[in-house]
Amino acid sequence: MRAAHRPLWQWQLQPAAPRALPHVMINAKPRQYTIYGLTLEGRTFRPSDWAERLAGAMSSFRPGGGAGGIGAYIGYSPYCVPQVVDGVKCVLVSEALKGIEPMAWDFVMNFARDNQLQVAEVCVLPEQPLPQKKPQ
């Protein structure tokens, strides 16, 4: 699957408040967002390891919780992963993080807002075009 990035408005985030979701949304896949290491003015965000630091701070938020003890391993959460997109350091954040820990979601998104970083929703497109109906 290819990922296309759709710019969002400038973030005006508020703390997450519980709300009733429409019935249709219950089975919907969580949205994903990319936080780019570029400010709204287009400057590279510093320090250069910001993406690894942010993802490292979120590493304990995993499906089923974090495993501790001798069997624990070091790694990023699948909900907050550093990556490079078109040569720019980024963090891919899943909205599923909000369901596990709303304060962690707020922390990540407020980090982006406070540092005036560019944020875009990831739109996953199918690789194969959908079959077209033949005109009759």
Image: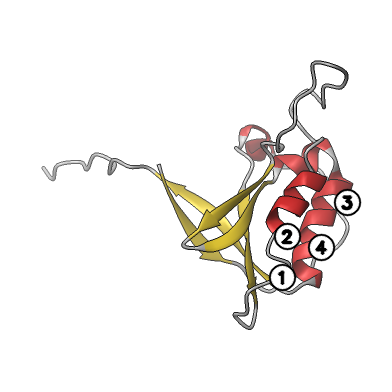
How far is disc 4 from disc 3 in space, using C-alphas? 15 Å
Disc 2 residue type (three-letter): Trp
Marks 4,3: beta carbons within 8 A: no
Q: Is residue 50 above or below residue 101?
A: below
Tag 2's secondary structure?
A: helix
> Hey, what amino acid is under mark 1?
Arg
What is the C-alpha distance between the residues marked 3 and 2? 28 Å
The mark that comes first in sequence, 2 or 4, is 2
Q: Please tell me whether mark 3 or mark 1 is closer to you in this view.
A: 1
Q: Quadrant of the N terminus?
A: top left
Q: Position of residue 76 (x, y in %)?
A: 70, 38
Residue of label 2: 50
Q: CA distance from mark 1 to mark 2?
A: 7 Å
Q: Kindly identify the amino acid type of the residue bearing the numbered disc 4.
A: Asn
Q: Residue under circle 3?
A: 17
Q: Which residue is mark 1?
A: 46
